[in-house]
Amino acid sequence: MSDKQFEPCTLEEATHVEVNGKVYEFGDGYLSRHKSLQSKLWDNIEVKKGTEGWQLIHVDAFPILGIKPLKEKKQEPIVFEFIPSLEMAKDMWLPADFIVPMKAVGKKFKCVEILEEN
């Protein structure tokens, strides 16, 4: 799960933006979302300009500047079937956390990867 994958979204849902093929995360000290005082909607991003302060960029300018709001794509867990063998139940060299009980031998199990949220 070290390689994050992203999908396009609205600025409201966005956690990142892509500019010229590079992905930036909101809240990294250089980039943040900004709500318009009039509409109360997330319709700007603020970009830090060195020591000179911040620059607002409105969503209408995103296509012109090549800015794409992104959110992290939900990863689907790996799912597979597993049938323990008699050899596995008797194997003393297997790790202690992988002990196969005798009553599980020959039965089919559905295994699902556990994905932990941060």
Image (cartoon, rainbow, N blue to C red):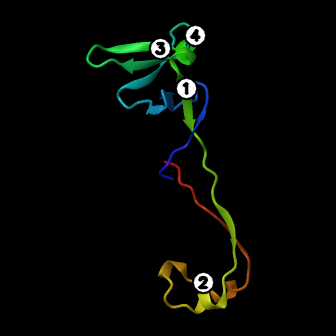
- Mark 2 vs 3, N-terminal side: 3
Residue at the (55%, 83%) spot, across then down: 99
**Residue annotated with mark 4:** 39
- Give, as a three-letter code, the residue at label 2: Val
Against 61, residue 4 (above or below) is: below
Against 35, residue 30 (above or below) is: below
How far apart are labels 4 and 2 at the CA level?
60 Å
- Give, as a three-letter code, the residue at label 1: Lys
Dot 2 and dot 1 residues touching (CB under 8 Å): no
Numbered badge on residue 57: 3
Residue 5 seen in this snapshot: yes
**Residue annotated with mark 2:** 100
- Looking at the rendered structure, the secondary structure element under dot 4 is loop
Query: Mark 2 or mark 3, which is nearer to you?
Result: 3
Q: Quadrant of residue 63?
A: top right
Residue lying at the far front of the rendered structure: 20
Residue 79 position, x and y percent, is 67, 62
Residue 41 seen in this snapshot: no
Residue lying at the far left of the rendered structure: 51
**Residue annotated with mark 1:** 68
- Mark 3 vs 4, N-terminal side: 4
Residue 32 position, x and y percent, is 43, 24
- Mark 2 vs 1, N-terminal side: 1
Residue at the (44%, 13%) spot, across then down: 56
- Looking at the rendered structure, the secondary structure element under dot 2 is loop
- Looking at the rendered structure, the secondary structure element under dot 1 is strand
How far apart are labels 2 and 1 at the CA level?
49 Å
How far apart are labels 4 and 1 at the CA level?
21 Å
- Mark 4 vs 1, N-terminal side: 4
How far apart are labels 2 and 3 at the CA level?
58 Å
What is the crowding at mark 1: few (fewer than 14 residues within 10 Å), some, or many (at least 20)? many
